[in-house]
Amino acid sequence: MDAIQQKVVQEKIDQLANKEVYVHLETTNGAYASHFDENAYNVGAFIRNAQVSYQHGKIVSTGGSYRVGLKLDLGWVYAEGLTDFEIDEKNRLLMAGHDREGRLMVALEISETPFSHEADPDE
């Protein structure tokens, strides 16, 4: 993955608008939190292969990271804290946010085909 290039990501978000796409959204502070602070709570959210069609989407800078919002017919999907992206060989838009130590904190991925449901070393 590379550092987010806002224009490139926005163009890909626009290309995927008004299509049936699959979304993977994940947030976590993982086991990191309780390993370093016994009073910290582990938190996380995970959804994979949610099939949606968004009217439009937008990436905005939040000062050091980015927020991506996708406007659905009945609401929004958004992820904040994104720092890195790639458009992979399957033409999927993969975005992630990492902390200072490089650990995953948030992921938002958009694909025209479903993501695998098995452990896949390529995903």
Image (cartoon, helix red, strand yellow):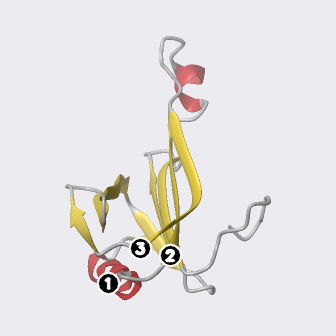
Please report the residue visible at 29 percent of the width from the left and 62 percent of the height from the top.
69
Q: What type is the residue that disc 3 sits on?
A: Ser
Please report the residue visible at 50 percent of the width from the left and 75 percent of the height from the top.
21
Q: Position of residue 82 (x, y in %)?
A: 38, 58
Please say if the residues under marks 2 and 3 sit with CB atoms less than 8 Å apart: yes
Please report the residue visible at 41 percent of the width from the left and 73 percent of the height from the top.
53
Q: Where is residue 67, by image quadrant? A: bottom left
Q: Which mark is residue 53?
A: 3
- Local packing at callout 2 (Cα closer than 10 Å; few below 14, some 14-19, many 20+) is some
- Establish if 14 lies above or below 83: below
- Please identify, in this view, whether the residue under mark 1 or under mark 2 is nearer the observer: 2
The image shows a total of numbered marks equal to 3
Which one is in front, 74 or 117? 74
Which residue does the numbered mark 1 point to in the structure image? Answer: 14
Q: Position of residue 114 (x, y in %)?
A: 64, 72
State which tag comes first along the sequence, 1 or 3: 1
- Local packing at callout 1 (Cα closer than 10 Å; few below 14, some 14-19, many 20+) is some
Which residue does the numbered mark 2 point to in the structure image? Answer: 21
Q: Position of residue 58 (x, y in %)?
A: 25, 71
